[in-house]
Every structure is written in structure tokens, then in C-alpha cells.
Amino acid sequence: MNPIKLMVNGIPGNMAVNVAEHAATNEKFELIPYSLTGPEITQSEYALNSLSVRLIRPEMRDQMIADIKKNKGSFIIVDYTHPSAVNNNATFYCENSIPFVMGTTGGDRNFLTDTVNASSVPAVIAPNMGKQIVGFQAMMEYAANTFPGLFDGYSLEIKESHQKGKADTSGTAKAMVQHFNKLGVPFSEDAIVKERDPEIQKTVWGIPEEHLKGHGWHTYNLVSNDKTVNFTFSHNINGRDVYARGTLDAVAYLFEKVEHGAKGKVFTMIDVLKGN
């Protein structure tokens, strides 16, 4: 099978670079050496090991994408840009008939879904690309739907820690709030404790220093009304490799859907896990 042509947007951002590095060394993929980047980026190229990736600023986006499509034909985009760019980028991909995997969190998620549904392209959209974490979320969703009100009377604390550069609250933590609400715990996304201070992460949380610039630690702590029962769920990820591997699995899944004629449909990482 010919390799899947893939463009990763958001370089020189850490997550975009990590995915691009994995794709560049994986024979299943052909990495297109271009990347849409933000207006604040002044460099024109990024050295990805032995590959030079040209960075495309917003004012050059239309012409460069048209040129890439002309020279490369059809391809898939992975988006790890910035929360403020989510909806604009998705609209652009749909208008230009480019299937995409949206790993960037934030933006108006309902509008994002509606944009894809009204278009001619399919997309994989997920707040978390780590397959094992997504599996854990699925288990929590099953519990919430099967045992509603299970934790009536319990209080909840959600804490999440990510590298200093992550602008928004974890999309994974936000998604978990909905499950706990169904389980009978009143809790708002605004109450999520978000830590971005490297010194506190190291001294209080115990996050290894070598992973302060790339990690995702989450803790969900439930306590009964009378303080006699405590449940704690945690998932701590050091580095970004688990997300990059999951992202490329999502790309391969989306490619198969495109090959079978999928249009105007949003897929999730649950769909990727099931392989349906």
C-alpha cells in the first residue's frame, strides 16, 4: 500500500513536532514538509531531524495549500495548533475538502462538529488522542449511563497538570465532568484545578523534572458526605509519545474511511479504538 500523505499543522509547537517526528520515521506515512503556523511565528523553516519543514503563516495559507494539493494530490491534515485557531482552521479544511484529525482542544466544539457535518469531508475529533486514556473515559461513560446517581452525596475534586505552555484547561478533564455529573455529583468545569507552575508541579505534585515541559497528570477524587469513603482515579502521562501514536492511528483510521467514501461525518477516538 502507498504511504498515507500527511501534513501536520502547528509546528513548532511541541505536540505537532512530536507527531511529525513519529510520522517521518513510520513507513506507513509520507510527511508533507509544510506546516500551517501562527502569526506570532517569525521563522520560515523548522529542522525536523534531517527534514526541513516550511512554516506557512496565515497570510500565505490559501496559496500554499492550493499549491500542495496541486503537487501532492489528496492528503490528510493533523491539527495541533492553538485553541483560538480551532474553528477557523476546521472551516478552512472543510472548504478545501481536506479530511483532518483535530487534536487541538478548545474552540466552539458544537460549531466544530456542525462545520464538519455540513461539509464534504470526514474528520476525527477528540480532546485526547491517548488510546488508553480514551478507553478509561469509555469505562466511566459506561458507568455513568448504567449506574446513574451512583455517587449521589459525594463531593468531587478534579486536578490536572500540564506543561506551562498549554493555554486551556484539559479537554479530557472537561469531558470527565459530564460523566461524574451523570453519576450524581454536581460539579462545574470552572471548578477544575489547573496547574501550570513548573515549581509546584515538581515540588508538590512530584512530576519528574525531565517531563515538566511535556506531561498530563489528572486526579479525580471522590469523598462521601460523611467522609468515610474515598475513591481516587488517576492517569499520569509523562511525555507526548502516547498521544502521537494515537494520533497516527486516528490518521490511518480516517484514511480508510475516506477510501470507503465517508463524507461530512465526525468520528471519535472511540470509533478508532473499535475500528468500526
Image (cartoon, grey):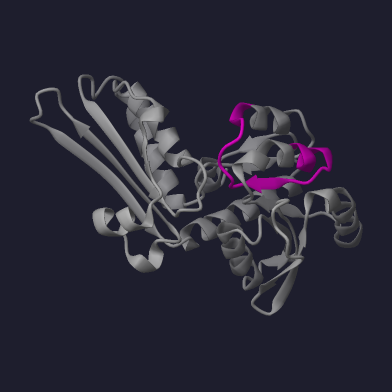
Instruction: Determine if residue 234 is in view.
Output: yes
- How many numbered discs? 0
Given residues 222 and 76, the one toward you in this image is 222
Q: Position of residue 16 (x, y in %)?
A: 61, 58
- Is 108 included in the stretch rendered in magenta? yes
Q: Reply above or below: 222 against 259.
A: above
Q: Is residue 49 above or below residue 90?
A: below
| Residue furthest bottom in the image | 50
The C terminus sits in image quarter: top right
Q: Position of residue 171 (x, y in %)?
A: 48, 39
Judge whether 43 appears above or below 101 on screen: below
Q: Residue at x 61, y 35 (%)?
A: 107
Q: x%, y% of residue 186?
A: 32, 20
Magenta range is 91-110
* Residue at 73% from the left image edge and 53% from the top image edge: 76
Q: Specify whether residue 64 is painted magenta.
A: no
What is the quadrant of residue 257 in the picture?
A: top right
Q: Residue at x 46, y 40 (%)?
A: 169
Q: Nearer the viewer, residue 98 or 193?
A: 193
Where residue 106 sits in the image (x, y, percent)?
57, 38
> Nearest the camera: 165 or 113?
165
Is 41 above or below relative to 116? below
254 lies left or right of 246:
right
Q: Is residue 271 left or right of residue 3?
A: left
Q: Residue at x 35, y 35 (%)?
A: 140
Task: Locate residue 105 relative to residue 219 in the image: left or right.
Answer: right
Q: Does residue 262 show up? A: no
Q: Quarter of the image containing the N terminus?
A: bottom right
Q: Nearer the viewer, residue 39 or 225?
A: 39
138 with respect to 202 (left or right): right
